[in-house]
Image (spheres, rainbow, N blue to C red):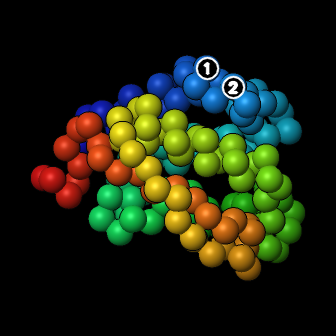
Amino acid sequence: MTDHLENIPAQVELHFSDNYRHFKEFQLSPEYRPYWDKCMEAVKDRELLSHIIFCNDLLHIPPVKTFLLYYEGDFVSITGREDAALDTFVKKAIGAFWGMVFKFALGYRDQESVSISLNQKFFVRTATYFKNPSRPSIRQK
């Protein structure tokens, strides 16, 4: 599994704006750079990415939830708010980022939106977990 994890940051960096045109500014605008950089940091950290995949595959915890909770303190700093409230564009762009990772870079074919109830921090109500990977998942090994 770890062999293909090395290629993910490059794939995301190269193809995100093409696959998610509505969120091009998330990758390119200095205003959103701290959020983009945090997302890229997560996919470059092979151990963290393995945990995000594990939580998605076995526990059906959306990558967005695992990512936000892991970096909670960083998001408090980035937003300058104790509740780390994210605006609508940032929430959707982070979701698109993880969609890019799971659907395009990892080859998951299906997805399901579920309640994640991050109402005290971030104010994210729903997120997507991904199903039916084209490659063997952790569960299948």
From the viewer's perspective, tell me whether residue 106 is left or right of residue 3. Answer: right
Report which residue position mark 2 lands on.
Answer: 21
Looking at the picture, how far across and down is residue 67, in whole percent? Answer: 55, 58
Report which residue position mark 1 lands on.
Answer: 18
Q: Number of marks in the image?
A: 2
Dot 1: what SS?
Answer: helix
Q: With respect to residue 55, does 117 lie above or below?
A: below
Residue 73 visible somewhere in the drawing: no
- Number of residues whose C-alpha sits closer than 10 Å to that of mark 2, classed few (under 14), some (14–19) or many (20 or more): few
Residue drawn at x 79%, y 46% is: 89
Quadrant location of the N terminus?
A: top left
Given the image, on which type of amino acid does mark 1 rest? Asp
Dot 2: what SS?
Answer: helix
Task: Depth check: give the residue in front, 87 or 44.
Answer: 87
Looking at the picture, how far across and down is residue 133, in whole percent? Answer: 29, 43
Q: Are marks 1 and 2 in contact (CB under 8 Å)?
A: yes
